[in-house]
Image (spheres, rainbow, N blue to C red):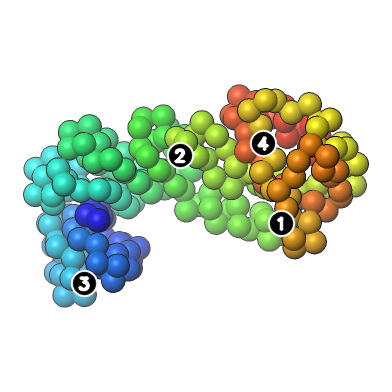
């Protein structure tokens, strides 16, 4: 596996260390000369000093042979451009971008980034789940945003409680993939009856998500 990391944060250092332990070939592109010196002494990765949005630096880093490019800078435009160049100019099959502004996450996916993740959104989702502020928590988008995976918590006021799955009138593209009940995970079928306290792992399409979640939890 040949991996290119773009950026200079602690995340890049720890990922480089983890990947090299798996015997991946790791190259880091970093525009700060001091960071490059530190990374060269602290990791066994190949270090390229320069801008990750520069085609010549990406080529020097081996983008033509790379399996994955991870753009992890503090600049969303830089992360997007680096991933687009890697995919379109060098044919890198998989690109992953850190999204600093959660509102940009869907934009990255529409523009062809294989995986775009917002650490802000992930942390917020964890906090929401731990404090149980809401009944629906989006866990992750998949298939370039064409599907959403959500955790739906049912309570005694949820309109779907007491109903069988087959009677819910969910859209054809919606799937209740699992039910977590009393810490036991089950895969439901049409004859499964929903109960208050159930956590449902629901896969929906963005265009029908609101309708289906209203059916489940109101």
Tell me what residue is drawn at x 35 percent, y 43 percent.
76
The residue that mark 3 highlights is 43
Mark 2, residue position? 105
What residue sits 37% from the left and 39% below the top? 114
Work out whether 159 lies above or below 131. above
Q: Earlier in the sequence, mark 2 or mark 1?
A: 2
Viewer-nearest residue: 64 or 193: 193
- Residue 78 as seen in the image, left or right of residue 151: left
Image vertical order of residue 132 relative to residue 203, above or below: below
Residue at 53% over, 49% down: 121
Which residue is tagged 4? 175
Secondary structure found at label 2? helix
Give x and y (percent) for residue 208: 65, 26
- What residue is pinned by disc 1? 185
Q: CA distance from mark 4 to mark 3?
A: 44 Å
- Residue 130, quarter of picture: bottom right
């Amino acid at each position: 596996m040949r991996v290119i990391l773009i950026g200079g944060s602690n995340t890049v250092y720890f990922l480089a260390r983890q990947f090299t332990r798996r015997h991946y070939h790791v190259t880091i592109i970093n525009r700060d000369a001091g960071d490059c010196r530190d990374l060269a002494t602290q990791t066994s990765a190949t270090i390229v000093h320069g801008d990750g949005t520069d085609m010549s630096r990406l080529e020097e880093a081996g983008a033509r042979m790379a399996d994955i490019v991870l753009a992890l800078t503090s600049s969303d435009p830089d992360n997007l451009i680096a991933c687009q160049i890697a995919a379109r100019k060098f044919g890198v099959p998989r690109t992953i971008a850190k999204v600093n502004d959660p509102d940009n996450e869907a934009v990255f996916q529409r523009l062809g980034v294989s995986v775009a993740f917002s650490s802000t959104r992930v942390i917020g989702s964890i906090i929401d789940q731990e404090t149980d502020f809401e009944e629906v928590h989006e866990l992750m988008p998949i298939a370039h945003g064409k599907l959403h995976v959500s955790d739906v918590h049912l309570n005694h006021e949820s309109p779907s409680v007491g109903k069988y799955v087959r009677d819910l009138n969910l859209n054809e593209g919606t799937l209740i993939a699992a039910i977590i009940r009393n810490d036991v995970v089950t895969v439901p079928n049409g004859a499964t009856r929903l109960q208050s306290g159930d956590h449902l792992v629901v896969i929906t399409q963005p265009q029908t998500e609101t309708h289906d979640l209203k059916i489940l939890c109101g």
